[in-house]
Structures are given as C-alpha cells and as structure tokens.
C-alpha cells in the first residue's frame, strides 16, 4: 500500500478530522508564503526593517502609514488571486465528513470562498475584512476602494485609522478562535492533516502531538521537511493542491 493510499484509508475511516492549513496552501494560488513575506522582501522592507516589525501591532500604532504600506501589498495579493483546487478538495472533504474542521493560519478568506462551512472553520489569524475604525469602531466592507486609496485608510465617520481584523505580529490571538479550537481539541480528533505550514506555533503543533499520543492518525503535506515531519505518521511530499486532489479521489472514488 502506498503512502497516499494509507493516508486515504485512515481519513476514510476517521470521523472527527482536523485539517490545519498554512501559507503553503495559498501559495498554489500565487500568494507569497507567510514567512514569505520574507520571500517578497527577502525578510527586510525597503526601510530596512524586518517584515515582522513592519507588520506588527506596535508599528500600526506608531507609524500606521508604514504598517499599511505592507498590509496593502498583502491585501492586494489576496484580492488578486483565487482559491485553488486544494481549498476546494478540503471543502469537499468537509461535505463528506460532517465532523471535519479546518484550522487555518491564512487571512485570505479562500476557505470560505471555496465552500468550507464557516461554523467548522477556525481562522486563527483573522481575516482581511471588514475593516474597522480603531477610534469609533465603525465597519467598512469596501476593502478594494481602501486598498486603492491613500495609506493609511481613514474612517468615513470620524477620520480615525482603519485596520483589518487580522492578528499582526506581537498581537494576541482572537479569543473566540482559541476557545473554538480547544473546545474541539478536548473532544479529540481521529485524524489531523497538516497542509503547507512550517508549524512554528504551539497551537499548530499541539493538535498534531495530542492526536498522535491519543492513537489518532497524523499526516503532513508539504514539499519540504519541517519540524513536524519527524512527529507525524506520514509525510506526503508535494504541492498541496496536487496531493489533496489525489487524496480526495481515493477517499470519494470507491
């Protein structure tokens, strides 16, 4: 039995499944990977700052125009691309498996666009829209217009600085998303699939470790080896959209 057949059999037998996705999944749509903001700027902005500093909460407060310069580049990239066959395969898996959840680090909204049910989608780093005013709280859903205008975008009501509901570097994760994740983790998962992530955050690694220790099946889909690779049952090397399509065809084809 090949690795992909073994993984397909385990997923087919599983009821509760967690799919963890990172920037490698959206890279197949043409987006830069998240560390790949480092890829875009070689890790350093035109101003000579680490990209993590430019896209941080403190920078948004201290120099909103600079932070928004790079937020806008990221936003335009997200709006300029579309979900790919990998996102669609995950959404189809969720249709086949009513207890299949998605935990994503991506802020591009592609899982929703591809058809993943919002009630089983945990966007741990938030999303790009709607923008909201940091002064009065008013929301603005016209992201396209704001990205085409002057930076930073201003509130129509009070003139305050707008921001997206994303988690910037040095900011806390959204409490509701963390609560949802750990509520589901307490119920346990039969299988965890890590897709296109370097797995550098504890809340990404922990579901894999806990599921493996509890006797569940764990798999990583990534073109390269990561810190998670030695921990999982199977590492499937390849592009996310190719491997996910192949997996789905094995699961739904019988």
Image: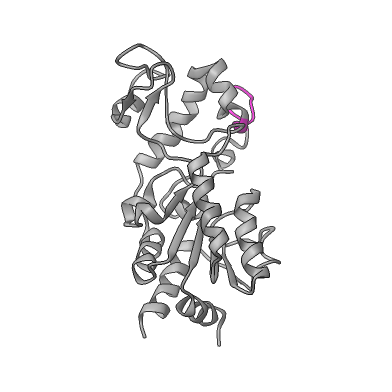
Residue 236 drawn in magenta? no
Q: Nearer the viewer, residue 198 or 165?
A: 165
Q: Position of residue 164 (x, y in %)?
A: 42, 30
Instruction: Give the color scheme: rainbow, by chain, secondary structure or one colour.
Output: one colour
Q: Residue at x 48, y 80 (%)?
A: 13
Quarter placement of the C terminus: bottom left
Tell which residue pokes out farthest to the top in this image: 158
Q: Is residue 49 magenta?
A: yes
Q: Position of residue 220 (x, y in %)?
A: 58, 65
The residue under the point 63% across, 26% down is 49
Question: Is residue 46 visible to us here?
Answer: no
Looking at the image, residue 107 sits to the left or right of residue 129; the answer is right
Residue span colored magenta? 44-52
Q: Quadrant of the N terminus?
A: bottom right
Viewer-proximal residue, 52 or 178? 178
Point out residue 135 in the picture as x, y percentages from the top left corner.
42, 16
Q: Residue at x 61, y 37 (%)?
A: 42
In the rendered structure, the answer to whether residue 62 lies left or right of residue 200 reads left
Please state if 99 lies on the left or on the right of 169 as rendered. Answer: left
Q: Is residue 238 visible?
A: yes
Q: Nearer the viewer, residue 47 or 88?
A: 88
Q: Residue visible at 36% across and 78% down?
A: 252
Above or below for 51 versus 252: above
What type of secondary structure mainly makes up the magenta span?
A: loop
């Amino acid at each position: 039995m090949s690795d992909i057949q073994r993984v397909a059999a385990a997923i087919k037998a599983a009821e509760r499944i967690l799919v963890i996705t990172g920037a490698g999944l959206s890279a197949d749509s043409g987006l830069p990977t998240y560390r790949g903001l480092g890829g875009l700027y070689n890790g350093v902005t035109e101003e000579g700052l680490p990209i993590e500093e430019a896209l941080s909460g403190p920078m948004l407060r201290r120099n909103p125009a600079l932070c928004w310069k790079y937020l806008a580049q990221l936003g335009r990239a997200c709006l300029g691309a579309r979900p790919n066959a990998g996102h669609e395969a995950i959404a189809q898996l969720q249709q086949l498996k009513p207890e299949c959840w998605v935990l994503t680090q991506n802020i591009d909204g592609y899982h929703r666009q591809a058809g993943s049910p919002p009630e089983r989608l945990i966007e741990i780093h938030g999303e790009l829209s709607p923008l909201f005013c940091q002064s009065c709280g008013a929301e603005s859903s016209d992201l396209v217009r704001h990205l085409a205008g002057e930076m930073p975008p201003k509130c129509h009501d009070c003139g305050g600085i707008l921001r997206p509901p994303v988690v910037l570097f040095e900011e806390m994760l959204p409490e509701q998303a963390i609560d949802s994740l750990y509520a589901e983790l307490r119920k346990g998962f039969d299988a965890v699939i890590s897709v296109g992530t370097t797995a550098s955050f504890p809340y990404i690694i922990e579901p894999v470790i806990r599921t493996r220790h509890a006797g569940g099946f764990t798999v990583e889909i990534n073109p390269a080896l990561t810190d998670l690779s030695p921990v999982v049952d199977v590492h499937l090397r390849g592009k996310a959209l190719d491997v996910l399509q192949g997996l789905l065809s094995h699961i739904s084809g019988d």
